[in-house]
Every structure is written in structure tokens, then in C-alpha cells.
Amino acid sequence: MSTYVVHELSDVAADEWNALEGGIDNPFLRHEFLANLERHSCVGELWGWRPRHITVRDDDHRLVGTVPLYLKDNSYGELVFDWSWAEAYQRHGLRYYPKLVSAIPYSPIPGPRLLVHPTADRAAVERELIAAPHELLKEEQASSLHWLFPDAAQMDTLERHGFLRRTGCQYHWFNRGYESFEHFLDGFTRDRRKKVRQERRRVRDAGIEIEILHGDEITAEQWAVFHRFYESTYDRRGGHATLSLDFFQAIGRDLPRQVVLVLARHEGRYVAGALNLRSRDTLYGRHWGCLEEFNSLHFEACYYAGIEYCIAHGLQRFEPGAQGEHKVWRGFEPVPTWSAHYLAHPAFADAVGRYLQQEQAAMEQQMTELRVHLPFKTVPDEK
């Protein structure tokens, strides 16, 4: 096997990349999504996401493994927060950036990060994919190597290879055979069911209509409107809207049935929108924005419309993004997420390792306590 570092994903054929993992279903890991981020300058030097993808090829030069990898000179857009680690390095006269990060830029989507062809020797390819970033770390004089939101099996693999485990929490909805949104609400306690119905009624009473469109149904004008909504969110927060209109239009074209856009119309004008992507069995909520404020519209567009979509299309899971304990009483269950970390400086690695053990215990306790606040009459078994 031979290992290569790829600075542009366009240098890898899309069908080769997408054939990994038995055919990549997660839209955020597909070549179309990641390559369009690069093609439309949503990552790169400007934003501090410099592609350093690892590829492994067998003796016949067939692609048998990859890692989406970036050289970072900041911690923006990662959703696993290590700013305090960077500050500690700086206080001790050390340099934390650059660092190497295996992640989906701007997207806290759990899933595999070690992408392996189904006919390859998985253990052997994974060893190559884990070893190669360590060599690159030395070449780039990076301080550390981070794997963000790996799935449970790959987190275990990374931990066996000496990476520190960090535990986080997201809130996911699970389809337990619901026939309709009302069937879903039937499992709620009386007070919680009443509150959700009130929120949905406020949106209807305001005269707002909800439209749900797939990528191949979205017009250029609708994409332009949504992009204004998306930019407005960052304008209010003082951040940077890194995803361009061209990028949104490109993924709508290249992932035509995996892009799911929710638009809210009031008195003939679009006033808000929420962008989702989907796999065969999961809906992923990503970006929201609005130009006018309406009571409960955020919950309708970002949560309830997504749940209805999952029920109607037979999807089994809805992951609406990072953070947000307010999701719990609306039927989203706390689930653990992980990241894996290697810090080259031994003393800092030891200090961070001790901290992560304490943080993990606190996170596990928090998730246990949050499950008490789920709205269901009978708390479902943990997923």
C-alpha cells in the first residue's frame, strides 16, 4: 500500500471516493459535498481550513482508504471547543496552531472518519490512515491531531491507537414507527403535548405557510433568498458566513435528492428557511436564518417540519445539529458524541487527558439527568 497527501479533492475521482464504506451514504462525506467546499472557496487559506486529505492506494493503485483532513490555524467551524487549550499553550510560550483536524468543515455530523473500501483489509488500511497524519504532523510542525465526531466503533479504534477520548452530547430524534406527527405526540405527557401544539398553532395563526423542497426543486431565486437568511444569522452574531450562494446551488445540483430545504412564507414573501441534508435513513439539520421574527417559527422550521418529513419518508433518525437542551422536551433525546485527540507535547497531553476524564464523567451525568426531562409518558430505552 502507498499513502498520499491530497491538497485538492478534485484530484481524486468522485466515483472512487464515493465507493468507500460500501458506497458513502452520508451526504457530508460524499465527494460532491467536500469538493464543492473547496471549489467555491468555503475552505482554504482564507478560512484556515487547508485540505490535507490522506489517501491510501493498493498495489494496483486502487483507492482503498481516505481521511478527510485539514491543516487549521484557528478553531472556528469545528463545534468541538479547544480555545482554552490554545490559550494555555500561548501562556506557556508555545504554539498551538497549526493543528491537523479530521472533520467535516462547519458540520458536527457524527460518522466514520476512516473511510475504507469494503473489499480491503480494514484493519491494515486503518493503521495506514492513522499513521499517515502523525507523519504529516511532523512535516507541518503542527501541535496536535484531532478527529471530530467519529462514530462509536472508530472512536474505540482511535483510543486503542493512543488518542484521548472526549465526550460530548447532541440531541437526536428517533422514529419509533410513528404514522404521523400526532401519533408521535400521543406518546407525550399531557402538558408537553399541549405546549408543542401551541407552538405549531402560533405559526399557523400568523398565516405562515411551510414549503419543503429537494435540491432539484429549488430555484435560483429560492437559493438566493435562503442565502440571505443564512447570512443574516451570522450578521446578528458577528460571525462570518463562510458558505457561498454558489456552494448552496452546487450541492442542490450535485446532491439533488439529499438536499432538503424548508422555507417559510408569510403574505406571499419568504421570511425564513432551514437547510437539511439527508441519507437513506437520517435527516441532518444544518443552517437556519430569518429576516423577520415570528413566535415559534424557529421550532417549526428547524424541528417539527423535519420530524414530519422523517415520518412521511420513513427516515429513522433526525440530527438537528449541535447543542440546545431546549430540544429535550420537544422529543429529542441526549446521545453521546466523541472526538479523539493527540497532543505532541507530553505535559499538555497529560493535563488534557486528566481534564477529559473529569469532563466525561460530568457529561455522562448530565445526559442521565436530561433524560428525566424527556416529554414521553414512558422514557424510551437509550439508543
Image (cartoon, helix red, strand yellow):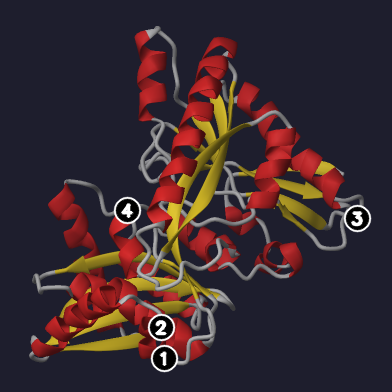
Q: Is residue 10 left or right of residue 179?
A: right
Q: Are marks 2 and 1 in contact (CB under 8 Å)?
A: yes
Q: Nearer the viewer, residue 193 or 242?
A: 193
How far separated are the C-alphas under marks 4 and 3? 39 Å
Q: Where residue 30 appears, x then y in whole percent?
A: 59, 65
Instruction: Please determine whether, in this image, residue 79 is positioned above or below residue 33.
Output: above
Which residue is pictured at 25% across the width and 87% down the height? 210
Helix, strand or loop at mark 2: helix
Which residue has dot 4 on it?
A: 242
Q: Nearer the viewer, residue 86 or 169?
A: 169
Instruction: Please determine whether, in this image, residue 181 is positioned above or below residue 76.
Output: below
Work out whether residue 5 can be spotted. no
How far separated are the C-alphas under marks 2 and 1? 6 Å
Foreground tag (3 vs 1): 1
Q: Is residue 294 left or right of residue 183?
A: left
Label 4 or label 3, whichever comes before in sequence order:
3
Helix, strand or loop at mark 1: loop
Query: What amino acid type should be assigned to the residue bearing mark 4?
Result: Thr
Task: Indicate which disc residue 180 carries.
Answer: 1
Task: Indicate which disc residue 184 carries.
Answer: 2
